[in-house]
Image (cartoon, grey):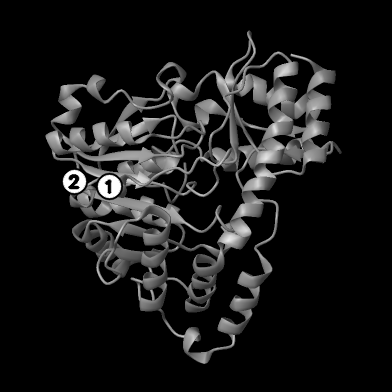
Amino acid sequence: MSRFPLSRRIQALPPYLFAELDRKKQEVRARGMDIIDLGVGDPDRPTPKFIVDRMKREAMVPANHQYPSYEGLPRFRDAAARWYKERFGVSLDPGNEVVALIGSKEGIAHFPLAFVNPGDAVLVPDPGYPVYHIATMFAGGTSCFMPLLRENRFLPELDRIPSRALSKAKILFLNYPNNPTSAIADRKFYRKALAFAEAHDLIVAHDVAYTEIYFDGVKPMSILELPGAKKRCIEFHSLSKTYNMTGWRIGFAVGNPELVAGLGKVKTNVDSGVFQAIQGAAIEALERGEEATDGIRKTYQERRDVLLPGLRALGLSPVTPAATFYVWIPVPKGYTSGSFCEHLLTKAGIVTTPGNGFGRSGEGYIRIALTKEKGRIREALERMKKVGF
């Protein structure tokens, strides 16, 4: 027995999905097998040069070497507000409706601490980004999982949520474009979700990290575009996927000023804000980034258009992604999510992500990330053909 037992909240956590993937990868790599990693969603292309150049300049400014403010530099929040206005037509007050984040994951993880009391319920998409559930647990809340099913276009059936859970619910988490299913939501769904939140007095916390990774020219929308949405909505945005900046750790939350302030109160007590030089580089990304994002989207669409027909030729029926850089794939007959991932890894050296790692409703699927060059994707398809399933 350990001299220092972990807290019950830590012991209750499921194994973090990508940590377990890393362990299995190391085992296979130790056998000398070449790994094609299509698991974790980390862009393989570098951050655009004009952003890196701005970072170099900002890093040389002595004032940036001091503690930043938790809420973010005024000029960064101004840039985020302008970007939202240009991209979505949504007007924001940068003074009280925008807060800087150390990546959107940080903001999502801290948000329930501001509004969830022990015993409260949080409505969590299933499958979904694991942090929604983990953050709820840390706040002492209970997750009520909303199944996302292919026959319902991976949208939650809000009218099927049990009334017992609704009576205790505080937050409705949404995520479109969706990780892991790659689905997008339309205006009709957002209107329904907002009316549902109004009827049950819910906070809507919308994770929009993938709005700029879309295909075929169809731009995903923000729920804040709807009249009245700002009364109860907060959105979490990230520069990570949009500008190939995953390691930089910068994002922002926007929306209702009370929700933004509540998150800010948590942040003042647990972090010291984002390095100001990174905020300066992020301003460059937000102001000039369109010249880079067009190319980023084109790269992922080209990869998608190699992978999808290849998977179909193997007898699989992948969901055609409208956005994100993920492909959500039902497993072949006779396999579970875990056993199919293990088969591909141990027999073919291909890392994929088991769908059940995102929740119970993800069982029967795997997720593939479009984060390798087309040549490596073709090689992965050849390996899958050789090992069979």
On the picture, is 90 further left or further right than 181? left
Dot 2 surroundings within 10 Å: few (below 14), some, or many (20 or more)?
A: some
Q: How many marks can you see?
A: 2
Tell me where residue 62 appears, x and y as whole percent.
52, 91
Dot 1 surroundings within 10 Å: few (below 14), some, or many (20 or more)?
A: many
Q: Residue at x 57, y 24 (%)?
A: 319
Residue 154: give its label: none
Q: Residue at x 60, y 41 (%)?
A: 325
Quick one: 341 or 73, which is closer to the camera? 73
SS at circle 2: loop
On the picture, is 134 further left or further right than 25? left
Tell me where residue 388 appears, x and y as whole percent.
79, 15
Q: Amino acid at mark 2?
A: Asn
- What whole-number distance in Å separates the C-alpha atoms at marks 1 and 2? 7 Å
Q: Amino acid at mark 1?
A: Ala
The quadrant holding residue 158 is top left
| Disc 1 target residue | 139
The quadrant holding residue 384 is top right
For the C terminus, give its image quadrant. Answer: top right
Tell me where residue 293 appears, x and y as whole percent.
59, 55
Q: Residue at x 36, y 65 (%)?
A: 81
Q: Is residue 252 visible?
A: no
The quadrant holding residue 60 is bottom right
| Mark sitting earlier along the chain (1/2) | 2
Residue furthest to the top: 334
SS at circle 1: loop
Q: Is residue 330 visible?
A: yes
Tell me where residue 221 appears, x and y as whole percent.
40, 44
Residue 117: give its label: 2
Disc 1 to disc 2: CB gap under 8 Å: yes
